[in-house]
Amino acid sequence: MNDLGEVLEARRKLVDKKATEARTSRDDWNAQSKKHFGTRNEYNTEVRELVQNAREQKEIRERMNDEVRERKRIRSEANTVVRETKEALRTLREDSDSNIGSRPVDKRGRPITIQSLGREADRLEREFSEGRHTGKNEKKVMERLQKIRRQIKEMESTESSNDEYSLAQERMREAVAIQEAAHVEVEAAAEQAQAAHQLMLEWQGEVADRREFAEAAHRKLRLSKKEADIAHKTYILSLRCLHSVQDMSRARRELERGTAPRQSARQGVQDLMSKLMSGETLTTEELLALQRD
């Protein structure tokens, strides 16, 4: 009987050690599960925020693209007005020429216009500032510039005396102003749309990264929970074995003393073991009580 007692005690210590190791392993895995659970949720929260940021930038991009289309429409209308006004001015000039005779032509036979005179004056002033006309030639250039300015003034006076021509010029100036303003707004809206698009792509890239991190944390969570379940099952099995050894040891001691088994002292433990064997969940305190008993 003493040999049996020694064997039972050795088995009890071995099973108790395994139960302690399994419980420690289970608790460690549960701690890791809690950590991975928190990490996964943090990444998922970041993903939701980044998705919202990307959605907002997409909305800005779409709104700016609508603005670009609207400004392009306005610019196109202004372009049409400019073309029509230019055509109207050309017709008015032709009518004016037919009424007052042909305008003078330059050495190449081309009609002299305000624009051609302005280009010639700009060229002469540029050459004069560069020092390309000196001495007697300088006087000739100055006289030519004065003559050009008088011609431009006379031609502008003639054209401005024509009310229809003046109205057409005014309409063209307004159309050009609208055209230029619309073009500036088109470029500004296009830049904002492009900036929003670029930022949206950056947010989407961040979303992909955070989702990958969240999925990695979720995989670790599943692994740790699986390992915790395995360790917990091992712990429960060890408890069952431990109590079987303890029951045998107690029965041996009672037989040696010639006394009947004490049911009342074991009632609490038996109740817990019954719950455990029936598949019910025990608290950590109840499990530790079972291992200590």
Image: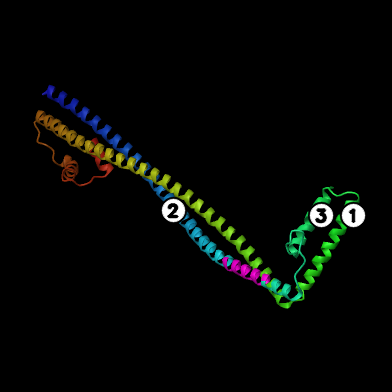
Q: Nearer the viewer, mark 2 or mark 1?
A: 1
Residue 121, position as x, y percentages in the image: 79, 58
Left or right: 39 as drawn, with respect to 281 = right
Which residue occupies the extreme top position in the image? 3
Magenta residue check for 88:
yes
Quarter occupied by residue 73: bottom right
Which residue was labeled with disc 2? 51
Is residue 76 positioned above or below 243 on the image?
below
Q: Is residue 39 above or below residue 164?
A: above
Q: CA distance from mark 3 to mark 1?
A: 13 Å
> Which dot, 3 or 1, sits closer to the camera?
1
Instruction: Name the N-terminal-most of marks 2 and 3.
Output: 2
Disc 2/disc 3 C-alpha distance (Å) = 62 Å
Magenta-drawn stretch, dominant element (helix, strand or loop): helix
Residue type, mark 2 in image: Val
Split into 4 quadrants, where in the image is the N terminus?
Answer: top left
Question: Which quadrant of the rendered structure holds the C terminus?
Answer: top left
Instruction: Write down the quadrant of residue 162 in the picture.
Output: bottom right
Q: Which mark is residue 139?
A: 1
Q: Percent from the top left, x then y, of residue 233?
A: 22, 38
- Sequence-earlier tag: 2 or 1: 2
Q: Position of residue 152 (x, y in %)?
A: 80, 66
Instruction: Depth check: give the residue in front, 9 or 114.
Output: 114
Q: Pointer 2: residues within 10 angstroms few (<14), some, or many (20+)?
A: some
**SS state under label 2:** helix
Q: Which residues are magenta?
A: 76-90
Q: Which residue is mark 3?
A: 125
Q: Nearer the viewer, residue 112 or 256?
A: 112
